[in-house]
Amino acid sequence: MSPHAGTGCRAQKKPVVVLAGEDRNDRRSLRIILEELRPDMRGRLVEISPPVRLREASPANLAHRVGKLANLARARAVRENAELACVFVHEDLDAADSEAYVQTRERVQKALEAELGNVHYVLAVWEMEAWLLLFPEALTALVSTWKIPAKYRARDTGRLQDPKRIMMREVTKAPRRYRESDAPDVLATAVALGCHERPAGGNRSWDRLREDIAQCCGRHLQQR
C-alpha cells in the first residue's frame, strides 16, 4: 500500500482530521483551537490516544514511531468510514525557543510528511503553558485569583524559562493552583472572550499552529 493511501480525494467518503498528542489534555486543547478557527472542522475531528513521542527519537526510532502513528491514523479514518484529510500531531519541545526548535520541527515534520502526506507537527515552545500565558484575561476569568505578573506580559512566551512552573508558582496561588488538565478550559475561555485573537505577547509556535490550520482547511479539507 502506498504510504499516502487514505489521503487522496474520494468524494463518496466524508473527510476527517485526526488529532494526536502527548495526552488527552493536549488533544482537547487542539480540538478547541481547531473548531474555533475553522468551524468547518466541527464534526470532522477524531482522535487517537497513544501518546506522541517523536522529538527525541533517533532516526531509526523516528521512522518506526511515525509509521505506527500513521497506521493508527488511517485505521481511525477507516473506523469512521471516512477519508483521512490530514493529521495534527502535538508535542511539547520542553525547551525555550531557539534554532533547535526549527531543526526539530523540520526533522519530524519531514518524517511525518513522508508517511502521511497531509500532516502538521505542532511543536509547542516551551510547552502548551507558554500559549496560556498569552491570555491573561482568560486566566483571570476562569479563576479570579489567577493573574499573570506584569513582567511576563507582552513577552515572547516561548523564551520564558519553564512556563509550567510560572503557571504553577507565580500565576496561580494555593489552594487553587494550575493543573495540566486546566489547559483546555483556559483555551475555551480565551475563545469565549475572543482574546485568542489578541494575544498579550508572542509565541511563534502558536503563530505556526494558526498558519497550519489555515493551510489544512485551504488545501486538504475544502477540496473534499
Image (cartoon, rainbow, N blue to C red):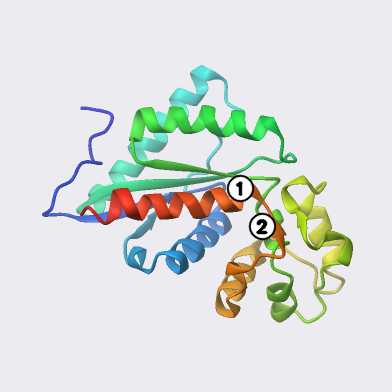
* Residue at the farthest top position: 60
201 or 158: nearer the viewer: 201
Counting residues from the N terminus, which is met first, the one under dot 2 or under dot 1?
2
Residue drawn 26% across and 33% down? Answer: 4
x then y, percent, for residue 40? 33, 66
Q: CA distance from mark 2 to mark 1?
A: 9 Å
In the rendered structure, find residue 205 and report the number of the disc placed on it: 1
- 158 left or right, relative to 172: left
The answer to which quarter of the image holds residue 171 is bottom right
Residue drawn 53% across and 27% down? Answer: 107
Up-down relation of residue 192 to residue 153 (above or below): below
The three-letter amino acid code for the residue at tag 1 is Ser
Disc 2: CA contacts within 10 A as few (<14), some (14-19) or many (>=20): many
In the rendered structure, find residue 131 and report the number of the disc placed on it: 2
Quadrant of image for the N terminus: top left
x then y, percent, for residue 108? 51, 31
x then y, percent, for residue 73? 35, 43
Numbered disc total? 2
The three-letter amino acid code for the residue at tag 2 is Trp
The answer to which quarter of the image holds residue 12 is bottom left
Quadrant of image for the C terminus: bottom left
Up-down relation of residue 88 to residue 3 (above or below): below
Up-down relation of residue 175 to residue 169 (above or below): below
In the rendered structure, are the residues bearing label 2 and label 1 in contact, judged by CB atoms less than 8 Å apart? Answer: yes
